[in-house]
Amino acid sequence: MFNNKPKTDMQTNATLPAGNATLISAGTVLKGDISSSGDLRIDGTVIGNVKTSAKVIIGNSGVVEGDVAGGQADITGKVNGNIRASELLQLRGECMVSGNLYAGKLQVEPTATFNGQCHMGANIVEMGSTEQATTAATATWGSV
């Protein structure tokens, strides 16, 4: 009645063009899991898991309390959880990571701090996901 445009013209496309990134700025605290198909930059605090098929950047003031998964990961902040990067994982500057690393390739600067196990290679990243599911199933079965 008020709009003569067909409904298909009014619908928006939910996919982001390449090159766009989601930013969680400093001073922001987000509780819950994040999933994205685009790049993510975290300068605030995320209490939950972060997953993307693109690149995850955790800046100097960024903190993640949960697992991080992406095609690439560039960490300069703090992560308390496992990190999975199917391509390249970079631990830079004064970053502090407490958790296991699963990466196709790994670059660690001398000033970075990392406590956990490191597993490298393209097959390892995929196996890490399967290993986590198996461990969870075993823990559930063992506690009965």
Image (spheres, rainbow, N blue to C red):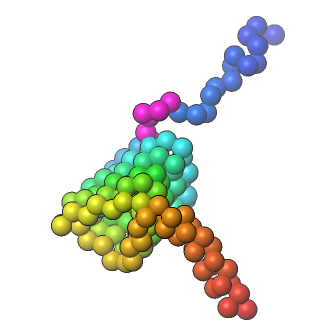
**In the visual, does 111 lie left or right of 121?**
left
Q: Main secondary structure of the magenta part?
A: loop
- The magenta span reads 17-22
- Measuring 63% from the left and 77% from the top, which residue is drawn there? 134
Q: Position of residue 19 (x, y in %)?
A: 42, 33
Instruction: List the single residue furthest toward the right.
Output: 1
Q: Quadrant of residue 1?
A: top right
Image quadrant in which the C terminus is located? bottom right
Which residue is most to the top? 4
Q: Give the quadrant of residue 97.
A: bottom left
Residue 93 in view in this figure: yes
Residue 85 occupies quadrant: bottom left
Name of the residue lying farthest toward the left: 110
Note whether 29 is above or below 20 in the view shown: below
Kindly identify the residue that appears in the image at 36 percent across and 51 percent down.
57
Q: Residue at x 55, y 69 (%)?
A: 127
Q: Does residue 18 lie above or below 91 as drawn?
A: above
Q: Is residue 18 magenta?
A: yes
Residue 56 picture location, percent across and down = 41, 51
Which residue is painted at 42% across and 54% down in the image? 87
The x, y position of residue 99, in whole percent, is 41, 74
Verify whether residue 141 appears in magenta.
no
Spot occupied by residue 125 in the image (x, y as percentages of width and height): 49, 64
Q: Can residue 62 be seen in this snapshot?
A: no
